[in-house]
């Protein structure tokens, strides 16, 4: 008997009977290789959206506790069906709700955080040679109510279980083959990355790579859980997300990521008093708006007022304006400008820490394309530029080429070896 | 604050958003009258059938434990949605799963029996002035697994909670207005019965009246729970099912019930040895076939063999034959005859205990119609006759008229008074 593996299947991987059976076969195959197997399943395809629609039919403002009771049924259905399919293959499986699996959360309904994983029942089932299926995205609160972890929560369930069970790896099965050097829909010769570090993956998730949920990557980094992000439709290895010490000498830049759904708000004539910025961003936070990049200009020559720009998700633009209106009147901001059609392009790479020329190359590459950079923000391993939304694709392609991310295919032996 | 009421809403009463809101208003109205309210909900409309179909898509023989995990989601969805609707009406509601509500069952998956109701959490919620919604049809087993109680199990959940909470009444809301003297689709002047006794209701449920599940009536009788069976679409009172001591002087006959889905098997030349009948009916019981009426003829003059007839649900006919085939060979039964198109008509009434002429009147009424009686069985308060399936409607109408069940509208003041 080798060690424990956690396998997570997303909604598209269990969307219909055929896909559930395929997931069942893959789970059984891991079991037959001698692993102790725990699989975390998401709700099927559109189930969660349909349940949300049902809630909106009966209530204008669905109670969060009841929303969790409602939404948690989706993953239970997936797990029960997959357990049936596995039992039909001659193996023994048991499905567990988040509560039965010991996922203990706080009481923040619809966005609960995991406080503890009490895995006794999972251990007991594994000791009885059972395959264990766990309903993702959910737990039980300290008040004994059903909770959910928010969108993408199944990834977090899987990583938390992998940590609690000291699993060898947390396999995240999805409808893409792994993490790419850029979105292959924009850059046809983008390459699949064999390995990325937690820090790179965090920056990539935060700057538009949709393949892994930011929160699950944070959890994995904090608990040292190796994630293997891979396709549920092929046997080929995907991308391993691991600690930096496990990654080899890295190229300067690992990937180019992007987002097309940004909007910029510009506050003109912000009084240069202490506390004004606090007022502005408290109002936005209270309206639950995620502010991304913030830039404040120098005050005017007379030192009396400044301009301030920041980006928000385009879908939040209207609520952001509504939240700002009272503040504008109160603190005496002169005007608000908005640019709703913005995008963001980012280059991410742990290698740039020791190479100072990356920013210059990013700026000149975009300049050569005639793309205007509206805002810039950086971290030690990331440079992001806000550009016009309709320039995003061109910017991604130009940066991907400038840093040789496609052509310069570094042949790294995959940690899991060749495809089966 | 007056006492506790348990209200149960069936699948058609929560089938869509409008009906859920209507159920919510009705629950709120009971609360506003000062009751402590516990409502038990079934799965919406066709949900259970759809879940069963999903299971059949992934497995030829779905595991019963997983089937229960799957099916139990339907009632949870209804409860969560109804709780949202109640909260929107300005009242506070909480939905509980069968497990959270303390419905403890044995481990017989898909047909579990309730062992205990540990209602502390319900009491606590009621003490906090909450309306409590409980997912029907389900519980948690002594092995901590989700169980279901079998078809119609939500009625049993409601009655069990009413017993545990010492409720004033258990309101069963359904798509019919109450219990009728005969099926109104067959007998247009059938009348709604204001009161029936547990014993009558048991006989009626067992002989074809679909409105209340036999098991829930048994539970109600054993625990003295008053059931009020009523329409979810009107405010009119329905039918009260209570102990005989609570019913008034009763007419001879209360109702005529029927079933159209019977089949008769006749075993010709059954050896007249001890143990042969035991073999036959053990084989049928092991195949899970419900045998209803059994008649054994006198042995032949030489005392060596007998004929035996019994009825089974028509849908079980094929399995019954399969179960009997080995027994036929083994004990030397000469032949099996089958009549697949049989029906059953029954008259039920607590009054017949003290009036000997009822059977004679039933037989002569059917005889006058030229309807042949194939088999007869009786209890102290019921007479059932097996007839050809295509004679059932005529038999029901003739018996209903012969016993004056429609015309002789006895005006009994309804225990709950006039409609609101």
Image: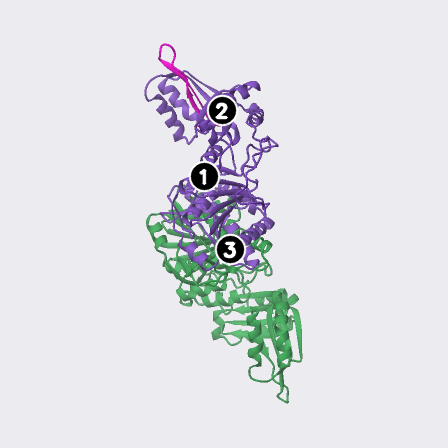
Chain colours: A green, B purple
Which residue, given by chain and number where applicable, does mark 1 sit on? Answer: B217
* Chain letter belonging to callout 1: B
Identity of the residue drawn at 42% across and 55% down = B123
Q: Does the magenta segment cover residue B76?
A: no
* Chain letter belonging to callout 3: B
* Chain letter belonging to callout 2: B
Question: In the image, are marks 1 and 3 on the same chain?
Answer: yes
**Which of these two is toward me, A320 or A61?**
A61
Asked if residue B8 can be seen in this view, the reply is yes
| Residue B42 picture location, percent across and down | 51, 46
* Horizontal side, residue A71 vs residue A307: left or right: left
* Horizontal side, residue A241 vs residue A395: left or right: left
| Residue A164 picture location, percent across and down | 37, 59
Provide the secondary structure element on which disc 2 rests.
helix
Which residue, given by chain and number where applicable, does mark 3 sit on? Answer: B34
Provide the secondary structure element on which disc 3 rests.
loop
Q: Which residues are magenta?
A: B291-313
Asked if residue A88 can be seen in this view, the reply is no
Q: Residues within 10 Å of mark 2 (few under 14, many from 20)?
A: some
| Residue B183 picture location, percent across and down | 56, 33
Identity of the residue drawn at 44% across and 28% down = B353
Question: In the image, are marks 2 and 1 on the same chain?
Answer: yes
């Amino acid at each position: 008997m080798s060690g424990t593996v956690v396998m997570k299947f997303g909604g598209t991987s269990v969307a219909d009977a055929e896909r559930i059976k395929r997931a069942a076969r893959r789970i059984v195959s891991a079991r037959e290789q001698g692993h102790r197997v725990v699989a975390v399943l998401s709700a099927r395809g559109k189930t969660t959206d349909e349940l949300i629609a049902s809630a909106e039919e009966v209530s204008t403002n669905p109670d969060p506790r009841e929303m969790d009771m409602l939404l948690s049924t989706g993953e239970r259905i997936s797990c029960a069906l997959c357990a049936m399919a596995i039992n039909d293959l001659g193996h023994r499986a048991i499905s567990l709700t988040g509560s039965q699996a010991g996922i203990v959360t706080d009481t923040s309904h619809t966005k609960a955080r995991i406080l503890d994983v009490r895995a006794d029942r999972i251990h007991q089932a594994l000791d009885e040679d059972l395959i264990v299926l766990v309903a993702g995205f959910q737990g039980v609160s300290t008040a004994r109510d059903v909770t959910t972890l928010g969108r993408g929560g199944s990834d977090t369930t899987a990583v938390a279980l992998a940590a609690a069970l000291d699993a060898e790896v947390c396999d995240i099965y999805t409808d893409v083959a792994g993490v790419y050097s850029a979105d292959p829909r924009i850059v046809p010769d983008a390459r699949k990355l064999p390995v990325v570090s937690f820090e790179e993956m965090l920056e990539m998730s935060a700057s538009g790579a949709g393949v892994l949920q930011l929160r699950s990557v944070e959890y994995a980094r904090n608990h040292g859980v190796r994630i293997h992000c891979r396709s549920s439709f092929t046997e080929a290895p995907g991308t391993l997300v691991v600690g930096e010490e496990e990654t080899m000498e890295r190229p300067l830049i690992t990937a180019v990521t992007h987002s097309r759904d940004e909007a910029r708000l510009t506050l003109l004539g912000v009084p240069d008093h202490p506390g004004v910025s606090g007022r502005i961003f408290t109002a936005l936070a209270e309206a639950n708006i995620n502010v991304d990049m913030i830039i404040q200009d120098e005050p005017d020559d007379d030192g009396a007022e400044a301009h301030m720009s920041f980006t928000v998700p385009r879908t939040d633009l209207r609520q952001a304006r509504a939240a700002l209106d009272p503040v504008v009147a109160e603190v005496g901001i002169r005007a608000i400008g908005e640019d709703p059609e913005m995008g963001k392009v980012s280059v991410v790479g742990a290698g740039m820490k020791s190479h100072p020329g990356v920013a210059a190359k990013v700026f000149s590459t975009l300049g050569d394309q005639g793309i205007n950079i509206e805002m810039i923000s950086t971290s030690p391993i990331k440079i992001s530029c806000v550009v016009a939304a309709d320039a995003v694709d061109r910017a991604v392609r130009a940066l991907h080429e400038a840093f040789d991310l496609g052509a310069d295919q570094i042949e790294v032996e995959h940690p899991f070896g060749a495809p089966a």
